[in-house]
Image: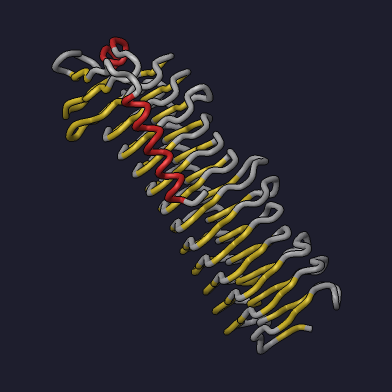
Amino acid sequence: MNLLSREFLSVVAATCALTAHGSAEVLLVPKQHATIQAAIDASSPGDTIRVAAGTYTEAPSFLAKPDRALIGVGKVILDANGATNGITIVNSPFVAIENVRIRDAASDGILIELSSSNASVRKVVVEACVDDGIESSADGVSLIGVVVKQVGDVGVFCDGPQSYLRDLKVLNNGGRGIVVGGARTIVSRCKVTASDGDGIAVLGSDSDNVVSECDVRDASGHSLWVASATSANLVRRSRVRDASTTALRAHGLGTVLIGNTVRDGTLVGIDCLDDVLACGNTATNFAGPAAYRIQATCDAGVHANNVAKKSGVDGFLVESGADGNLITRNRSTDAKTGFDLHDAATPGANVVLGNQFKKTDP
């Protein structure tokens, strides 16, 4: 399923949730109900809660309140004032949150629990919360146009399958930027800046996730990391700058890297640890040990049409033990103190064909 189809289905699901009941009402805060929580408690499935501009010192919860929408009109600030979560959604599928600013929660800005599938969060800002910005374990969650900044731990932790994250901005957080823990999740056009941990991490043991057209800068951990227990993930057309460790670290059986650009880091640009298919990627200006590394655990991978530029040590490094890899039509320039290709593997174990390498070893 392509990105447009996924977005279309998300919009259809949200629309159906809001129009399924002919008697749906609009509840106004504070005109009809003094607090957001009072309006939620008074609402019925299909209702919309419209909140007027202002600051509301409360931490509302949807507890067994499915099929509701909470929409801010103008600048709506929800100050949790040290309550556990800014908004909590439990046992409430098809809840939509839109156009609110959440701050000062003792734990998460928004918590979406397992039983609350198909939640939708759009145009929401979460800031200054002690733990995560948004934590979700539900399936089918849609997060679009969300900003998370200055939270204590993970910006967005999405542990449920079949979720959709688009146009997120995650800034200056104390932990990882975006964590994907479920299968068949799409992360598209997201920006992560200055995370005190990995920028975007695909974890867990699930598969078939897509990270597309994302931008990660200044992560203190791996900028973009696909973990070892996952499989069949795709990272495409994403960009990394100012990597403190590895810019793009590709574990996972059958991981595919296509058209990514990484530059300016202290260690390795692109690091392949399993049977990775990597095509059309570029790594520029990495201190070493290599701009592009094929580790000993990378067997039967395909590495084609990749470019390494301005490596502090080696351009392409094939470690001893790497076996059965096809290395073809790659190019390396300006390996300062090493080799454009440093093949330390057993001679003949890998196929090296049609590359543009000036300095090679052996």
For this orientation, the residue located farthest to the top is 42
State which quarter of the image contains the C terminus: bottom right
At 66% across and 63% down in the image, what residue appears? 277
Indicate the quadrant where residue 32 lies. Answer: top left
Indicate the quadrant where residue 75 lies. Answer: top left
For this orientation, the residue located farthest to the front is 22
Residue 193 appears in the picture as rendered: no
Q: Which of 323 and 120 is in front in this view?
A: 120
Judge whether 114 appears above or below 305 on screen.
above
Residue 326 appears in the picture as rendered: yes
Left or right: residue 72 compared with residue 313: left
Left or right: residue 26 compared with residue 341: left
Residue 184: x percent and y percent?
Answer: 57, 43
Colour logic: secondary structure
At 44% across and 23% down in the image, what residue appears? 93
Residue 61: x percent and y percent?
Answer: 37, 18
At 63% across and 66% down in the image, what residue appears? 278
Q: Which of 114 and 35 is in front in this view?
A: 114
Left or right: residue 232 compared with residue 31: right
Residue 223: x percent and y percent?
Answer: 53, 56
At 69% across and 55% down in the image, what residue appears? 254
Q: Nearer the viewer, residue 39 or 309?
A: 39
Residue 44: x percent and y percent?
Answer: 32, 13
Q: Nearer the viewer, residue 70 or 360?
A: 70
For this orientation, the residue located farthest to the bottom is 358
How many numbered marks are there? 0
